[in-house]
């Protein structure tokens, strides 16, 4: 499944799947002015970026992100909010 | 000398120093936005707040570039948006998955006299950091604000044994947090006082203040709440907080995005 196969309302349900090499290429790079890629790992330790980063990418060096395969977003479990002490 | 009146250029609106600099930096031409910014500038002057502000982020103009600029100094502390954001005329919406915005302002630069502000347009309840600064080597002075977690606002500014919790059933609104030796430690949502306690003589961490997360990579708490204003300053009083809210809400009302 690709970005063009889903509606904008479905964006939050999916993320773009990266290889380790692709993740390394994107770290610290801008997808559009004043906006930086932020690859993260999902619950299965896949490297992923958001559909917003894919859709709004205007950096000609990274337009390939628009063609990434989409997978359902499966977030890492959030640690509980810790007590202060 | 005879002047042909048909050759005289009509004069446009005149703007204050900050608004003029904003135009030069952003190329903004929308007269509603420029009028709102100019009124904001006038209000800051009227209320004696200009010298107290380090940075103001109006999130006006609808693009990542325009939303990145600091109104107080367009050459300093431009926001860097990280991860998935959607920018529009109503502000900047983080996706709640991997998005935050770095101010480039060291929290510690304020010492123990600070004012932290953001304006949220989304009502949601969850483990979502609205503002923070995290230092993994000294977590006790980390900063974090969660406006609505299980119906409560959590203020860890900084965390060092000083968490303050108050009931908050709606995460939308203009939030102001200040601390200084003359006026104590206060928090406001819009014009409502949420916290009124004693001055805390502990500086915040020496890491950047960020919006929509708190900077802990091992335990991120990415927010999904739309930002429509942010600001940082010092030497605030309760009267300043009230006046600041009046100015910010007037700005939002002019842009038809007030909550």
Image: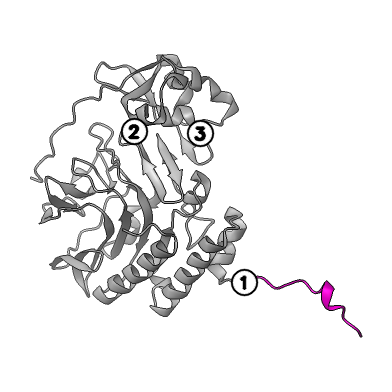
Report the number of numbered marks.
3
Residue that carries the numbered disc 3 in the rendered image: A30
Up-down relation of residue B225 to residue A38 (above or below): below
Q: Is residue B208 visible?
A: no
- The quarter of the rendered structure image containing the C terminus of chain B is bottom left
Range shown magenta:
B1-13
Residue that carries the numbered disc 1 in the rendered image: B13
Q: Nearer the viewer, residue B104 or B223?
A: B223
Q: Quadrant of residue B252?
A: bottom left
State the CA–CA distance, disc 3 to disc 2.
15 Å
Q: Residue at x 30, y 59 (%)?
A: B116
Up-down relation of residue B29 to residue B197 (above or below): above
Label 1: element kind = loop
Q: Residue at x 34, y 70 (%)?
A: B244
Rendered location of residue A83, percent (x, y): 8, 43
Rendered location of residue A59, percent (x, y): 56, 30
Q: Are marks 3 and 2 in contact (CB under 8 Å)?
A: no
Q: Are marks 2 and 1 in contact (CB under 8 Å)?
A: no
Label 2: element kind = loop
Is A39 magenta? The answer is: no
Specify whether disc 3 shares its chain with disc 1.
no
Q: Chain of mark 2?
A: B
């Amino acid at each position: 499944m690709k970005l063009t196969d889903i509606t904008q309302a479905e964006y939050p349900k999916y993320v773009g799947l990266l290889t380790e090499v692709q993740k390394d290429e994107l770290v610290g790079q801008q997808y559009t002015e004043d906006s930086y890629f932020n690859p993260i790992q999902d619950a299965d330790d896949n490297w992923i970026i958001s559909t917003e980063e894919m859709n709004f990418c205007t950096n000609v060096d990274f337009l390939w992100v628009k063609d990434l395969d989409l997978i359902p977003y499966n977030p890492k479990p959030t640690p509980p909010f810790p007590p202060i002490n | 000398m005879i002047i042909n009146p048909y050759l005289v250029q009509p004069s446009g609106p005149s703007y204050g120093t900050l608004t003029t600099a904003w135009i030069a930096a952003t190329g903004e031409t929308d007269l509603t936005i420029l009028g709102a910014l100019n009124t904001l500038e006038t209000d800051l002057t009227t209320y004696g707040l200009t010298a107290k502000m380090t940075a103001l982020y109006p999130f006006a103009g609808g693009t990542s570039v325009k939303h990145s600029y600091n109104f107080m100094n367009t050459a300093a502390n431009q926001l860097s948006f990280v991860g998935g954001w959607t920018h529009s005329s109503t502000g900047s919406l983080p996706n709640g998955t991997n998005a935050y915005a770095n101010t480039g302002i060291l929290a510690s630069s304020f010492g123990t006299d600070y004012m932290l502000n953001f304006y949220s347009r989304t009502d949601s309840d969850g483990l979502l950091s609205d503002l923070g600064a995290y230092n993994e080597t000294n977590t006790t002075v980390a900063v974090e604000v969660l406006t609505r977690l299980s119906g409560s606002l959590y203020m860890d500014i900084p965390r060092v044994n000083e968490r303050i919790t108050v009931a908050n059933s709606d995460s939308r609104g203009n939030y102001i947090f200040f601390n200084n030796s003359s006026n104590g430690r206060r928090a406001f949502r819009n014009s409502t006082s949420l916290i009124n306690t004693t001055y805390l003589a502990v500086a915040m961490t020496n890491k950047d203040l960020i919006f929509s997360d708190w900077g802990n990579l091992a335990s991120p708490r990415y927010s999904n709440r739309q930002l429509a204003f942010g600001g940082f300053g010092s030497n605030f009083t309760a009267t300043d907080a009230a006046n600041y809210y009046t100015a910010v809400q007037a700005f939002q009302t002019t842009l038809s995005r007030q909550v």
